[in-house]
Each structure stands twice: as structure tokens, then as C-alpha cells.
Image (cartoon, grey):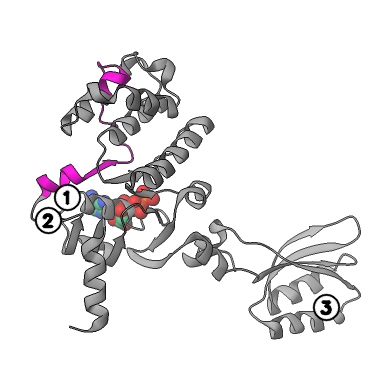
Amino acid sequence: MSVETARRNRRAASAAVAIEGLTKTYGEVRAVDGVSLTVERGEVVGLLGPNGAGKTTLIKCALGLLVPTAGAIRVGEVDVRSDTARAYREVSAMLEGARNVYWRLTVRENVRFFAGLQGIDPRTRRETHADLIASLGLAEQADTPVVDLSRGMKQKTALACTLARETPVVFLDEPTLGLDVEASLGLRQRIRRLADEEGRTIVLSSHDMDVVQEVCDRVVVLNDGRVVANGSVDDLVGAFRARAYRVTVSADLPLAARERLERAHRVERWSRTASGLRFEVTLDDAAAFYALVDDLRETDVDLVSVTAVEPDLEDAFLQLTDRVDR
Ligand SMILES: Nc1ncnc2c1ncn2[C@@H]1O[C@H](COP(=O)(O)OP(=O)(O)OP(=O)(O)O)[C@@H](O)[C@H]1O
């Protein structure tokens, strides 16, 4: 065994979630294609990817709800494939579209019920449950039967029930989708507290980059079933830093000149300003910049300013999954 393999095995052994070579196919479709991933205890990891990238399939495999075509998954000490029942005690999840709460029970009764399923005596959690319900903006509805709640409130109830199980690992599939601003904020704070104060591990999938950028320690980007990036938000954003620039020139350019620039450079987003014209350009190195300056010299306009466009997680994500217009 190589030193690197031994080190990886040691790391995986202490991890909250360890996925090794996971593949899941549906007929011809390779929904998840050889994914290896470890999540440390107390980490908040964001799972990103365009529609159909394989996020939900990966989560369902990790929960033991789908049988993988190949690969191994451990949650804590438990092998999910061989001991699904035990894995269920280690991990809770809220899946997109699945809002499995009891509609005839009130919000509070549901929360107490799901805590009880985990072997927690709800009488010892009165304050914790009230706090959980309030943090999701359901304080006023705590004693209302779920059947009488709006769709968003039902979702919040499902979230509260998921968190009330107090499992070491929590998977959340699109948790903020359809939540109002206040509840989304409450949930973000709750997630950070669960990780920071209670050492619980959260894996969340989301299309909302702001949520991911704000709460996640690390981001894993899936594309066509494969991991295309795995790093901290800062690392991912940093990898794309200072490649996009906003250029302002002193006057408008005729269409033919603009088209010439577009053919020679990665120029986009033209806009007129009070004193001239602005556009954005992606420049990989200094040579690309000098080439642009040379081409601008052949027009009648002067270069007024060049400023770096600070990218965010969304820019990094679009580049990684090739969803940008070049
Ligand atoms: N039950 C199924 N039968 C056949 N194909 C499926 C099934 N479930 C998912 N797929 C396919 O597997 C791929 C991955 O789907 P998955 O739902 O895991 O993606 P996702 O990243 O969660 O997408 P989204 O962001 O849209 O929720 C897609 O091509 C999808 O069409």
C-alpha cells in the first residue's frame, strides 16, 4: 500500500461521509460516474451542478435509497450498502419534492414525533424544538395542523423534522427553494450553528449560489455525473480571479470594428456610457491584453480604463460546467 493510499484510508476512516468510486447508471445514462468524495465531521459541503448533473442520485445513494451500480459509501462507521438500517440512524435528509410530514399533526407534534423516532425523548427538547421552529419562521404556526399551512410552511416543517432527528450527518436537497427571505436567512444561520456548535456534518445541494457561498466550507461541483471541482469557495472563485476585465474606451465604435474585436478576442457585454463605450473581455495573460490594446489602436478610440471584474461563485460555477457563452 502506498503512503498516499494509507493516508487516504486513514482520512476516510475518520470522515463523516466517505464515497469511493460511486457509479449509478439508469440504462444508458451514467447519472453518477466514478465519484470519490470525503466529507469531514463538522463540515458544510455544497453540492453544485446543472440540472441532471447527478446530485440527487448521489444523495439518494448515500442515504441507501438507491443501490449503486458500483462503489462504496460509508456514513460514519457504517457501510450504507451492507447496513442500510444502521445508516438510517446516522443520517437524515430532506429531499427535493419529498415533504413527508404528518398533515393531521401540528408543526410541533411533527417535530416531537420525528425526534422520538430517533430515540430522543421530546420532553427533554422543549426549548430546542421551540427554538428550531422559531428559527424557520414557524413560531406562530407551531400549534397549527400541517394540513392548514401554505406550501412553503409545509417545507419548513419538513426541514424542522429533518433537523430534529439530530443525526450526525444531514443531507439537504435544495433546502431554500421556495422559502421566503426570512426563512432562508434563518436556515442559513441554523446550518452554520449545527456545524460550528454541534459538530454536525451538512451536505446540501443548491442552485442558489448566494446560499452556498455564505454557508459552505467547501464546494463540490458535479457535471455529467463527475466531480469537476472540489475546493473552498475562496479557492474556486480565486481560480477565476482577474481573468475578466471591464474596458472603457473614449467613444462608440462602428459595428464592423466591434465585430472585428469580437472575432479576435473574447469580448462581450457591450454597453454605452455617458462618455464612450464599455465592454467586458476575458484575458488569459498579458499577451492577450497587449493584443487587445494593439487592435484598439487601429480604431479611432482611446483606452480610458481597464478594471478587473471580481468574479463570484456563480462565475466560477458557469466556467466549470461550461455554461458560459464564449
Ligand atoms: N429514475 C430515473 N430513471 C432514469 N434516469 C434517471 C432517473 N433519475 C435520474 N435520472 C437521470 O440521471 C441523471 C442525473 O439526474 P439527477 O436527478 O441525479 O440530477 P440532479 O443533479 O439532481 O438534477 P436537478 O438539479 O435537475 O435536480 C439525469 O440525466 C436524469 O435524467
| Front of the two marks 2 and 3 | 2
Relative to 108, does residue 18 appear above or below in the rendering?
Answer: below
Inspect the magenta stretch and tell me whether residue 91 lies in it.
yes
Q: Position of residue 114 (x, y in %)?
A: 22, 29
Inspect the magenta stretch and tell me whether residue 89 lies in it.
yes
Tell me, yes or no, whether the two marked residues, 2 and 3, touch with CB atoms within 8 Å: no
Residue 311, numbered label: none
Q: Is the CB–ligand 1 distance for label 2 below 8 Å?
A: no
Magenta range: 84-110
Looking at the rendered structure, the kind of residue marked 1 is: Gly
- Residue shown at the point (43%, 56%) measured from the top left: 50
- Residue shown at the point (38%, 49%) measured from the top left: 205
Q: Position of residue 180 (x, y in %)?
A: 50, 31
- Residue shown at the point (43%, 59%) measured from the top left: 219
Q: Is the CB–ligand 1 distance for label 1 below 8 Å?
A: no
Tell me, yes or no, whether the two marked residues, 1 and 3, touch with CB atoms within 8 Å: no
Looking at the rendered structure, the kind of residue marked 2 is: Arg
Label 1, residues with CA under 10 Å away: few <14, some 14-19, many ≥20: some
- Residue shown at the point (25%, 30%) measured from the top left: 100
> SS for tag 2?
loop
> SS for tag 3?
helix
Q: Earlier in the sequence, mark 2 or mark 1?
A: 1
| Front of the two marks 1 and 3 | 1
The number of discs equals: 3
Q: Position of residue 276 (x, y in %)?
A: 88, 62
Q: Which residue is mark 2?
A: 81
Residue 296, numbered label: 3
Tell me, yes or no, whether the two marked residues, 2 and 1, touch with CB atoms within 8 Å: yes
Residue at mark 1 to residue at mark 3: CA–CA distance = 59 Å
Instruction: Tell me, yes or no, if residue 11 can be seen here.
Output: yes
> SS for tag 1?
loop
Q: Which residue is mark 1?
A: 64
